[in-house]
Image (cartoon, grey):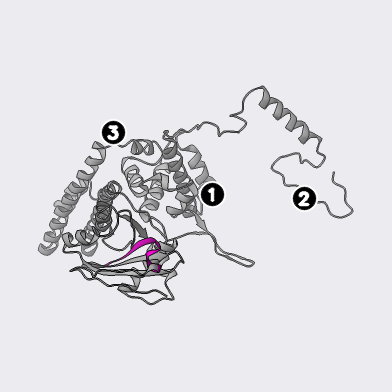
């Protein structure tokens, strides 16, 4: 059972004395429960017998940064801090790193599952995070570096502006629908479409609303252009973006989105882990003899999945030998584009995700004719490989049950029958 030795507030803390048993502590950690205006912090230590003791508690006001720094200066350098990935964690993680501490970001859904049978409260949440950290069972999320966060800030800012632009365009289309105005333009917001909108004789209220929406549309377009100019200007400095842009269907914007959302490729042990992070790994729904339909999970990076699926459209619109293997996969899964198009797009996006992992880890551009894998027949060219192939052919020829065509499955012979 936990014992609470002392409890501190923002103004300071009491002098803490330890008994001989309490001096033999072997580990210390901080549990940090984040709120908008304050945080509840719990200092916990583990004894040699494995008992966890709450040494001190504090309430840190976010409005007084200097007081927070003074309190954190009392904590030994290198102490791990478990904080939940709640709203506003980045600046707290930067402050902890500045004070020489080690922040660890907890995964909120997993923490909720582990604590579903326990009580809920600010003090209890802080104690729980420190306890998980000391016991080594803290489910951690990716703690993005400051560089990755700044890159994501720009990319997600552009995505938000694009959503706003789409919403404004839909509202303009709604004005025309309400007035029964039809137009022959495939792109209403191109040069000819804009001249058409400006020449319309509308009621005064509708004219004012349309004019305001067009001004807002121009302003949003200018802000998006500023971000795209930054993307083009930093293209030479971003080697990874240059490599990702060589993949079919991935241009400058999608390459920046994929680069920002992945952050660091080293945190993924294999391409399967990256597929799962992108939400492109099929999940099973089986029980006993029932085999449910495979589907993609919702717990993923939605921006990364959107970028990879959006790249499939570029792959399908590409002509020539570039990306031909991906288009063949789509044609095979859709039987010539007749059905199962959504599932086929996810499958092609999964192949693109694997290409991203391979190109990023190998630091080599995309090629329609990749080099042979180590250990394959193409890689092991030479007299020794020719001899192995001949030996394998002889062994296959000596088998009496070998079918004539390699794609034909052998059927087990029934009792009393001989195989021809």
Does the image show residue 335? no
When the figure is inspected, residue 161 is found, relative to residue 289, above or below; the finding is above
Name the image quarter holding the N terminus. Answer: bottom left
Q: Position of residue 293 (x, y in %)?
A: 55, 62
- In percent of width and height, residue 174 lies at 24, 61
Does residue 102 appear anywhere in the picture? yes
- Relative to 110, 153 lies left or right: left
Vertical placement of 208 versus 366: above or below? below
- Residue 365 in which image quadrant: top left
Residue at the spot of label 3: 236
- Residue 382, picture quadrant: top right
Of 316 and 303, which appears nearest the observer? 303
Q: Earlier in the sequence, mark 3 or mark 1?
A: 3
How far apart are the two marked residues, 3 and 1, measured between alpha carbons?
38 Å
Residue at the limit of the structure toward the right, as seen here: 416
The residue where tag 2 is placed is 411
Is residue 130 placed above or below 417 in the rendered structure? below
Q: Secondary structure at mark 3?
A: loop
Q: Which of 303 and 139 lies nearest the eye of the viewer?
A: 139
* Residue at x 54% of width, y 46% of height: 332
- Mark 3 vs mark 2: which is more N-terminal? 3
Tell me the residue that label 1 is attached to.
Answer: 333
Residue closer to the observer: 193 or 403: 403
Residue drawn at (64%, 66%) of the image: 289
Question: Is the C-beta separation of discs 3 and 1 under 8 Å?
Answer: no
Q: Determine the main secondary structure of the stretch shown in magenta.
A: strand
Question: In the rendering, at what x and y percent does residue 67 appear?
Answer: 17, 62
Residue placed furthest toward the top: 383
């Amino acid at each position: 059972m936990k014992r609470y030795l002392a409890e501190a507030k923002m103004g300071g803390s009491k002098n803490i004395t330890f008994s001989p048993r309490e001096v033999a502590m072997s580990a210390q950690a901080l549990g940090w429960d984040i709120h908008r205006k304050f945080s509840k912090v719990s200092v916990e230590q583990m004894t040699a017998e494995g008992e966890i003791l709450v040494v001190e508690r504090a309430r840190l006001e976010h409005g007084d940064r200097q007081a927070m720094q003074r309190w954190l200066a009392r904590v030994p350098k290198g102490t791990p801090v478990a904080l939940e990935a709640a709203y506003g964690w980045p600046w707290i993680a930067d402050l902890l790193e500045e004070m020489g501490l080690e922040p660890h970001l907890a995964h909120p859904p997993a923490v909720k599952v582990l604590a579903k049978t326990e009580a809920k409260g600010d003090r209890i949440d802080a104690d729980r995070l420190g306890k998980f950290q000391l016991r080594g069972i803290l489910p951690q999320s990716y703690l993005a570096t400051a560089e990755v966060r700044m890159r994501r800030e720009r990319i997600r800012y552009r995505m938000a502006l694009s959503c706003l632009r789409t919403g404004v365009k839909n509202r303009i289309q709604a004005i025309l629908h309400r007035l029964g105005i039809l137009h022959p333009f495939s792109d209403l917001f191109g040069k000819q479409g804009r001249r058409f909108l400006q020449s319309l004789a509308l009621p005064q209220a509708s004219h004012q609303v349309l004019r305001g929406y067009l001004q807002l549309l121009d302003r949003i377009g200018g802000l998006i252009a500023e971000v795209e100019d930054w993307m083009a200007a930093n293209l030479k400095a971003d080697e990874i973006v240059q490599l990702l842009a060589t993949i079919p269907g991935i241009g400058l914007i999608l390459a920046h989105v994929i680069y920002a959302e992945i952050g660091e490729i080293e945190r993924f042990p294999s391409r399967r882990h990256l597929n799962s992070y992108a939400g492109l790994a099929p999940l099973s729904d089986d029980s006993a003899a029932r085999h449910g339909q495979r589907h993609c999970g919702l717990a993923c990076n939605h921006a990364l999945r959107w970028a990879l699926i959006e790249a499939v459209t570029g792959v399908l619109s590409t002509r020539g030998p570039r990306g031909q293997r991906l288009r063949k996969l789509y044609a095979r899964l859709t039987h010539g584009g007749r059905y199962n198009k959504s599932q086929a797009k996810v499958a092609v996006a999964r192949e693109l995700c694997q290409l991203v992992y391979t190109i990023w880890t190998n630091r080599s551009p995309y090629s329609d004719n990749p080099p042979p894998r180590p250990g394959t027949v193409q890689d092991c060219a030479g007299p020794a490989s020719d001899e192995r192939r001949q030996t394998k052919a002889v062994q296959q020829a000596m088998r009496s049950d070998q079918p004539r065509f390699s794609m034909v499955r052998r059927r087990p012979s029934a009792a009393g029958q001989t195989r021809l």
